[in-house]
Structures are given as structure tokens and as C-alpha cells.
Image: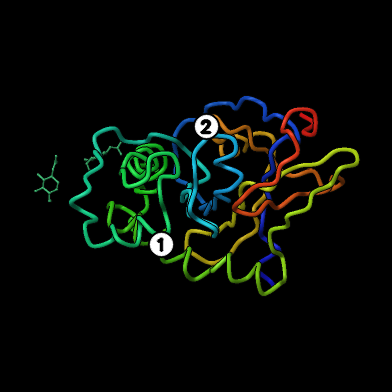
Amino acid sequence: MKSLASVVLLCLGCRLTSSFVLEPPHMWSKLILTHHWPSTFCSMEHCHSKFDYWTLHGLWPDKGQECNSSLHFNETLIQDLLPEMQKWWPDLKIPESSRFWKYEWQKHGTCAAKAESLNSQHKYFGKALELYHKLDLDGVMKKCNIVPSETYYTEGKMQILGQIEICFNSDFQLDDCEHSETDTVNLNVKGAGFSVCDHATPVYYPPLKVYYPPLKGKLSV
Ligand SMILES: *[C@@H]1O[C@H](CO)[C@@H](O)[C@H](O)[C@H]1NC(C)=O
Ligand SMILES: *[C@@H]1O[C@H](CO)[C@@H](O)[C@H](O)[C@H]1NC(C)=O
């Protein structure tokens, strides 16, 4: 279980992330493969998910956002990947749409593209899918008997598992994820308020059909 060493669990309601300092764009050194837990995401974003596995959220370089506005998203370039994308990298809010991929490409892919290994949309999306499958987070968690629970903590503080990040170096080998305050740019999931899980607080891993306590009051922010 070496891979678990480089996992970062993201929860809802631990602490709010602080704002980040914009750095001049330069070459990234790490990639963060982020996975969504659809049940948690949809409870925040009011969507209805049919996915009961960890879906791909994105492949994020550790430096830069929206690096090249002239690299327009073009679905035709990844036509052969689309069936896989729809299954493993779905837009949880608007199923069947390519809006999410376009967003991820513009925000993160155009920065990843500074490396020759990822300098096209096909390379970028293809590599993300490849790493996602190689890692098999869903399978690893089940194998470790880490499975969603229908019961939750009723006493004290609780946090809800929503995202898992795994890091790779520029050779696509597993690497530690080191988060400092200035890294919060990558933790700031738009509209979702995720932050790194607090180790001292119980983590609830909700099933697809969520049996939440009322969100308000149980979450400590
Ligand atoms: C943006 O992409 C275009 C097209 O590939 C390239 O010619 C240009 O050098 C890139 N700009 C930057 C700032 O990387
Ligand atoms: C998208 O890519 C295809 C294939 O290279 C090309 O024919 C088409 O013109 C591109 N579309 C846009 C809007 O750039």
C-alpha cells in the first residue's frame, strides 16, 4: 500500500482555504490527479449522480492556471477518448456535456501542456485516463475495505470525504503530495469548499444514496 502514502484526503467542512498568491507562470514539477466522490459532490452541488465509484476530477500541474488562451478546447481532437471520458470523467452537474473537460483543459491542461509529454489535448486527456486506470483508486480502497458507510457520527464534529488527490512527478511516477498554505490554489474546488481533512476529526464516507444528517449544524467550518 505504498500508494496510500501520497494520498491527500479532502473533506468538506474542515477549514476554509485561504486565498493564494499568484505566481509568475513557470514549469510545473508535479501533477495532482484528483478524484471526486460523486455522492459528496452532488450533495453540495445539488446534482443527481448515478456514479458509485471515484470519478476523475482533473489532472492539475502544481504551477499555473489558464496558461495559454490560444489553446482552444476541441472535442474532435479527443474523439476516440470520449466513451472513456464519459464513463470515468463525467460532468456530474451536466451529464453528457463536454463543458467540464473544456474547463479543465483551459484551467489546467494548458499549463500541463508546457511539458512535451502533455503538449496536446490528446496527450493530456489520454494521460489522465491512463494514470486513473493505473492507480485504480476505487479498487484499492475496496481492497483495503474502505467502503462507504450508511451510518455516520452523531457525536461531535464530523467531516465528509469528497475528494482524493494523488501526486505524480513529471515522469508520471507516484510522488508525495506536499501541501503548504501557498498550495491552496489546488485545493480550492470551485464552489465546493473542500479543504484538507483534519486528522483529528472523524471522516464520513457516504454511500451513493446519502443518509446525511442535516448538513447545517453537523459540519464545523
Ligand atoms: C500558446 O500556444 C501556442 C500554440 O501552440 C504557441 O504557439 C504559443 O507559444 C503558446 N504560448 C505560450 C505563452 O506558451
Ligand atoms: C478541431 O480539430 C479538427 C481536427 O484537427 C479541425 O478540423 C477543426 O477545424 C478544429 N475545430 C476548431 C473549432 O478549431
Q: Can you give x and y, in whole percent of width and height, for residue 170 in the image?
A: 48, 59
* Residue at 53% in and 34% down: 45
Amino acid residing under circle 2:
Lys
Q: How many numbered circles does the render carry?
A: 2
- The residue labelled by disc 2 is 190
Locate residue 73: give its quadrant: top left
Of marks 2 and 1, which one's residue comes earlier in the chain?
1
- Any part of residue 142 in sight: yes
Image: 21 above or below 147: above
Q: Amino acid at mark 1?
A: Leu
How dense is the environment of label 2, judged by Cα within 10 Å: few (below 14), some, or many (20 and up)?
few
| Residue 22 appears left or right of 212 | left
Rendering coords of residue 172 (x, y %): 48, 64
- Residue 121 in picture, x, y percent from top left: 28, 51
At horizontal 48% and vertical 63% (from top left) the residue drawn is 132
Q: Residues within 10 Å of mark 1 (few under 14, many from 20)?
A: many
Residue 30 can be seen, yes or no: no
In the rendered image, the quadrant that contains the N terminus is bottom right
Q: Residue furthest right?
A: 155
Please name the residue shown 61% across and 48% down the image.
163
Question: Under tag 2, what secondary structure?
Answer: loop
Give x and y (percent) for residue 161.
Answer: 68, 48
Residue 159 placement: quadrant: top right
Image vertical order of residue 137 relative to residue 43, above or below: below
Element class at badge 1 = helix
